[in-house]
Amino acid sequence: MSKLGKKFPIMEWLPSYQKEWLHADVMAGLTTAAVIIPQAMAYAAIAGLPLVVGLYTSLVMLVVYAVFGTSRLLSVTTSSTIAILTSHALSTIVGEGHAAGLLPASATLSLLVGIFLLLGGLLRLGMLANLISVPVLTGFKAAIGLVIVLDQLPKLLGVHITKAGFLQNIISILRHLPETSLSTVVLATAMLALLLGLKRFAPRLPATLITVAAGIALSVFVGFERTDISLVGSVQAGLPTLALPDLYLAKQLWPAALGIALMSFVETAAAGRAFILKGALPPEGNHELVATGLANLAGCFLHSMPGCGGTSQTAVNQGAGARSQFSGLVSAAVIMAVLLFLAPLFGEMPSVTLAVVVIMAGVGLVKPAEFRAILSIRTMEFHWALIAAF
């Protein structure tokens, strides 16, 4: 890479961009955006933030990574793992009933995550991704998946519980079972059947986006606001405005931010190495730290939550034929159009539809086959996976 290209990788791939790549990148960007939009809103819901924060995060991360990132295929937004860690960090700072404090706390968390990632890149700590045990990461992500599923289960049943610890939530859900809303359960079953059916019989279609669109259409035509089926509520239209982090929260948030930064880099590095164009070099670890660090730093001033490279959307990006980071810019343009013109429609989405999308993301983290593979190689590593999950 040239000296300029080392600082700004876009100066490497953009001048050498081939016109025959344009059609593939545009189609890949459009296809990936269809996955990113509902997922981003779902991850914001997991973090306990307004749904639009997920769209802001995706918009900022995609644009900044296209300038500073080294992977041609990586789609950088956020993930379910980062969302649940963010939720835990924010809940320790901002209690229930204090929603106004969530956005400043989230901005501060993004600022700290960005600083830690940027420092990691400047100190050339990219090789640390190789030191994290695969069994530990497997166990950790599986448990995160279970936490996500349990967190969304009340929405599938149409009940409300006071959230506490994992076991306490299970007990609370069981106690509220007699209050289950039959209409909510029926809608949840229909949404789940549609999503699973599309994934099974039409894998090339954007199953998540179609499911979300179907939920919104049913809500508009049937009038769910007149029933006991709850809606997600208003989604703010327009581009993100300037925000400032609350530096007084930094002392309380920095330990959580350090953990989130580590997980952000691990997920980004794993996704970047898993999806590489034929003949291309793997992403450079220190550059990835700097790129994601700068993306989080930019996001902290634009109402974003912490982000990282995502495996599912990167897989879609590759499958759709992406050739360069330009596909990410196309996805960002689609998200911008949604924020400007379609945001009010998403407010009509039933909460249960979003819960189904979130649960599917959580279930995808629980992979028994990986535990079996670990056990077949070494029992001690299997024990470490279970300990991490616990």
Image: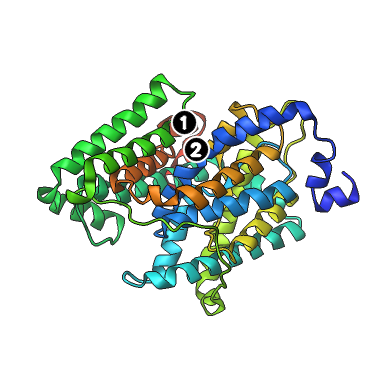
- The front one of 105 and 213 is 213
Q: Is residue 24 left or right of residue 175?
A: right
- The front one of 277 and 183 is 183
Separation (CA) of disc 2 from disc 1? 6 Å
Up-down relation of residue 208 to residue 298 (above or below): above
Q: Residue beneath label 1, please?
A: 206
From the top left corner, tell me how far across and down residue 276 is, in percent.
69, 32
Task: Give the residue displayed 72% in from the left and 55% down from the top.
Answer: 290
From the top left corner, tell me how far across and down residue 166 is, in percent.
30, 55
Q: Is residue 48 left or right of residue 21?
A: left
Mark 2 neighbour density, 10 Å: few (under 14) some (14–19) many (20 or more):
many
Marks 2/1 in contact by CB < 8 Å: the verdict is: yes
Task: Give the residue displayed 27% in from the left and 60% down from the top.
Answer: 163
Q: Quadrant of residue 217?
A: top left
Farthest residue, direction bottom: 248
Q: Is residue 384 visible?
A: no
The amino acid type of the residue labelled 1 equals Pro
Task: Give the residue displayed 44% in from the left and 51% down from the top.
Answer: 343
Q: Residue beneath label 2, please?
A: 35
